[in-house]
Amino acid sequence: MIGACKRQQDNPSTVVTASYPTIIFGQKYYSITVGSVRPTVNATAYDSFYKQSCQIVTIDSTIHNFVPGVYRGVIYATGQYGYTTYDTYYVAVTGVSAALSAQLAGHWMQNPLNDSISTNVTELATGLYSSSNVNGVNIYTNPTGVVYDLFALTSNTTIQFFTSGTVGTLSYTAIAGDTTMSYATPTGSVVFSK
């Protein structure tokens, strides 16, 4: 009688399709005043294969909200079967006004004009910018020397680059009729004007 009974084997394995959530930012660039709380990230995550929303987790310990500068935070979302997607957002910690911040955005030319060197500065949030060619190297004659970067206006006259690989410092002077931006390197400086 014992030989006539057969125990059914459990099958603990389940085949799943690898699917990573997609993170969608409502806002990726933030600005806070020095001493303010870190921003709440505006983002959602969705796994289109399994058709389900995923919870966003924010890692903001690298954002020093009492120290002026530009910082990167990380968010991630994990799907039903453990597949995780990571993405980044950026925060400027600054005390500059929105009016001063807006003055820095725009098209700048080297002064005096030399080799048609220019840079375009885009305001992403108050005191937070992206730029093309901010070090003033001509993109045609020296494309490897061109710096494309994020930076923050941390005071009325000081700018801090996000990446540590950028050589030199950028300073900004906003005086009526004499608005200039200067990129200083160990070998000299490049001065831009609007």
Image: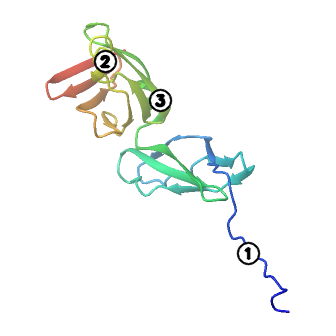
Of labels 2 and 3, the one closer to you: 2
Q: Measured from the top left, where is residue 165 in percent x and y?
A: 28, 37
Label drawn at residue 143: 2
Closer-to-camera residue (188/165):
165
Closer-to-camera residue (113/80):
80
Q: Compute the Cα span from label 2 to label 3.
A: 24 Å
Local secondary structure at mark 2: helix
Q: According to the image, what is the colour scheme of the structure?
A: rainbow
Q: Measured from the top left, where is residue 88 in percent x and y?
A: 49, 45
Local secondary structure at mark 3: strand
Q: Circle 3 sits on which residue?
A: 123
Dots 2 and 3: beta carbons under 8 Å?
no
Amino acid bearing label 1? Asp
Q: Looking at the image, is 112 positioned above or below residue 1?
A: above
Closer-to-camera residue (161/20):
20
Q: Measured from the top left, where is residue 150 in percent x and y?
A: 40, 34
Q: Looking at the image, is 6 positioned above or below residue 105?
A: below
Crowding near pointer 1: few (<14 within 10 Å), some, many (20+)?
few
Q: Compute the Cα span from label 3 to label 1.
A: 60 Å
Crowding near pointer 3: few (<14 within 10 Å), some, many (20+)?
many
